[in-house]
Amino acid sequence: MATIDEASVTSVKEQLDLKNKLLVRKILWMLLGSLLFAFALVPMYDVLCSLTGLNGKTNSTTAVLSKAKVDNSRWLNVQFTTNVMPGLGWNFYPKQANIKLHPGQIETVIFVAKNTTNEVVVGRAVPSVTPGIAATNLKKIECFCFVNQSLKPGEEKEMPLRFFVSPELPKDVSDMTLSYAFFPSVDGDR
Amino acid sequence: MSTTTTAHHEEHAEHPSGIMRWLTTTNHKDIGTMYLTFALIMFFVGGAMILAIRAELFQPGLQLVNPEFFNQLIGVHALIMIFAALMPAATGFANWMIPLQIGAPDMALPRLNNWGFWLLPPSAILLTLPFTLALFGIGDGALATGWTFYPPLSVQGGIGVDFAIFAVHLLGVSSVLGSINIIVTLYNMRAPGMTLMKMPLFCWGWLITAFLLVATIPVLAGAVTMLLTDRHFGTHFFDAAGGGDPVMFQHLFWFFGHPEVYILLLPVWGFIPQILETFSRKPMYGYKAQVYSFWAIGALSVVVWAHHFFTSGMPVPALLYFMYSTMAISLPLAVMFFCWIKTMWKGSMSFETPMLFTVGWIILFGIGGLTGLVLADVAADAQYHNSYFVVAHFHYTLFAGGIMGIMAGVYFWLPKMTGHMYNEKLGKLHFWLTAISFNLTFIPQFFLGLAGMPRRIPDYALQFAEFNMISSVAAFALGLSQLLFVYNIVTCVKGGKKATDQVWEGAHGLEWTLPSPPPYHSFSEQPTVK
C-alpha cells in the first residue's frame, strides 16, 4: 500500500517538474522576444522618423527637383544656426542669418568653415529642422552635409547649400529653423 | 523504495549551519530573509548618499562636495533605491509570502531563487566600487549622468558609466530570474481549489509585476548594451555624428522606465488591501475590480513612456496622445482608491502600526498620484519638467507609495515571520516620525519646483534658501527616524511577546493558519481551498 502511494507521489512530482520546465521555456521565449523587440525598435524608430520627420532629420542625399510651381501667395522665413561640437577646432557660420522665400523657390545660402588648428581635420555636418513637422518639406539639392568635409591647417572654405521648401508645407508653418552641428568625422576622410 | 524516500527527507531536514546555510540555501524563507536584509542595508546606503546631497543643498553655494561628486551621488542614490532597496524588498516579501499564501511547500525553482539573490551583492558592489577606485586615483568616480544614463553625457562619461551598465545587466538578470520563479510558482504551485481569481491580491500584484519585468527588463538591457557598444566598439546608436539619435535612448529607456514605476508599486498595491481588510475586520471590497485594475495599469504602463520627455520636441499629435493615455491611468487607479476607502467604510477599524502606515500611505500616495496628473499635462509640464516639482512628485509615489508601503508590510508580517510581536509604541512612533519628516522634506520641494529650481544642480539662487533649509533639516530627521525602524526589527527578531498563529484578530488567509514563525518546511500536507 505504502509503496503505491509513494510511487504516485514521485510521479506527481515528476509531472510538476515537467509542467514547470515547459512554463519556464515559454517565459524564456517571451524574454527573447522582448530582447529582439528592443533592438528592432532602432530601425523602427528610424523609419518612423524619416517618414514623419519627428526628430527634425532631413534628406541625406540629393532631393529630386520638384516640378511644383512656386507658391507666390505665401512667404516663409527660414533661419540658420550653426554649432561646432566639442573636439572640432573650427569656426563655422552662415553668411546670412535668415532668408525670406516662397515655397518652391530655389535658393542658395553660403556657409563658411575655417580650420583654426594646425593639422588636417575632417568634419561632418548634421542638419536638423525645427519644427519637426516641417523637416521633410525642406528639400536640399546640394549640401555640404552630404559628405565629409576636409580642411587643411588654417584653411577657410565657403560651402553652398541649395534648397527649396516644398509647397506641401503645412499652412500653419511660416517660420522654420535649419540648424547645422559640425561633428568630428567618425568614419575618417572617406 | 520507502527507505530511499525517508533518506531523502532527512537530507532535507538537516541544512548546513553558519555562513554555508545562507550561501547555499534554497529555502524560500531563508532567501526571502536575505532579500529583505539586503534591501534594508541598501536603503541606508542610498539614504546616506542623499543626506550628503541634502547637506550640500542646506545653503546656497558650494560647501561640502564638488559638483561632479554631487552628480555621482544623485545617480547612484536613485539606482540603489530602485534596484537594490525597493525591488529586493518586494521580491523578499514575494519569496516569504507567496508560497505561504497559495499553500505551496516552496517556490517552484528553488536553486534559481538562490542564484537570483546572490547576483544582487556583486551588482551593488559594481555600482559603488568606482567611488572607492577614485580614492586610489583610478577613474573619476561613479556614473554622473543621473540614473537615466542620457547620452551624449553617458557616452562621454568615465568608467563609472561602464560599471553602472554592468551593474544594471546583473540586476536585470536577477529580477528576471525572480520573475520567472514567481510566474511558475503562481501558475503551477497553487493549492487545490485555489483558482487564479481566488489568489490573495498580493499574488496578483506580483504576477503582473513579473510579466512587466519579463517584457521590459530586456529593453533596458538592450538600451544600455547599445550605450556600451557606442562607448567602446564604434557603433553610433545614439551619436548624431554617425547618424544616430540621442533622443532614441530616451524612448528606449522610458519604454522600460515607466513600467518600472508600476513594477515597484504593484506588489504594494497587492498587500495594502489585505492590511486594510485585516484591520477593518471586514472582507476587502472589489477584489475583482482591483485585479482588473492591475491588468489595466499593466497594459497602459507600456504605452505612455514619452511623457517623461515632453520637452524633447515632439509633434503636437504625439504630445496629445501621450498626455491622454497617461491621464487614462488615473482611471483604474481611482477604482483602486475607491476600493481601499470602501474596504474601510463602516469597518470596525483599529490603528496598529501596519494600519497607520497603510492609511498614511493612501493619503500620501494620493498626493503623489494627483501631482502626477499635473505633470502629465503637456502645457504645465513645459514649466515643471526637470524641476524640484518632479522630484517631490516621484518621492511621494516612490518613498510614500513604495517604501512606506513596504514598511506597512514589514510591521504586518514581521510577527508571522519572527514569531514575536514588535514594540507597538515604538512602531507607532516610527510611523509618526516618518510621516511628518517625510512631508516636511518634500512639501517644500513642490514649492521650490513651482518657483523654478532645477533638479540635479548642486547650487541654487538665493531666493530658494529657506525652503531648501527646511527640506534638508527634515531629510536628516527622516533619515535618523529610520534607525528606529532597524531597532524595532532587531528587537522583534530577538524576542518579545509571543505572536499567535493568526497574529491579527481580523487576519484571514493561508499564511495565518501556520504557526508563527512558520516551520522551516511549511505545508508538508497540502491544504485545500474551498
Image (cartoon, coloured by chain):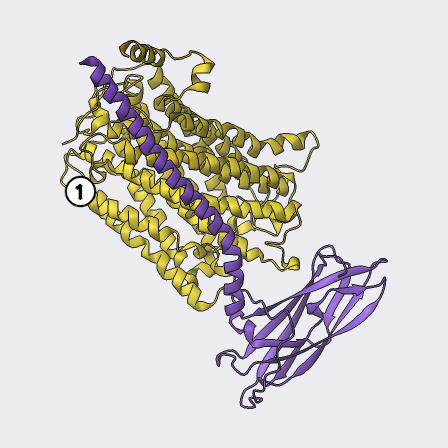
Chain colours: A purple, B yellow
Q: Amino acid at mark 1?
A: Tyr
Whole-percent x, y for residue B483 in the image? 42, 25
In which quadrant of the rendered image does the N terminus of chain B lie? Answer: top left
Q: Which residue is mark 1?
A: B285
Res B396 seen here: no
Q: Nearer the viewer, residue B413 or B210?
A: B210
Residue B472 vertical placement versus A180 (above, below) = above
Q: Nearer the viewer, residue B388 or B190?
A: B190
Residue B152 vertical placement versus B89 (above, below) = below
Q: Is residue B402 left or right of residue B294?
A: right
Tell me the subunit letter for badge 1.
B
Q: Nearer the viewer, residue B314 or B377?
A: B314
Q: Is residue A104 left or right of residue B102?
A: right
Whole-percent x, y for residue A66 in the image? 59, 83
Residue B14 vertical placement versus B366 (above, below) = above
In the structure shown, which secondary structural element does the residue marked by tag 1 occupy? loop
In which quadrant of the rendered image does the C terminus of chain B lie? Answer: top left
Res B520 seen here: yes
The residue at the point 46 percent across, 37 percent down is B83
Q: How many marks?
A: 1
The residue at the point 59 percent across, 47 percent down is B227
Q: Which quadrant of the figure has residue B519? A: top left
Q: Residues within 10 Å of mark 1 (few under 14, many from 20)?
A: many
Q: Nearer the viewer, residue B195 or B429?
A: B195
The residue at the point 58 percent across, 58 percent down is B245
Q: Is residue B431 left or right of residue A76?
A: left
Whole-percent x, y for residue A183 in the image? 70, 60
Whole-percent x, y for residue B505 in the image? 17, 26
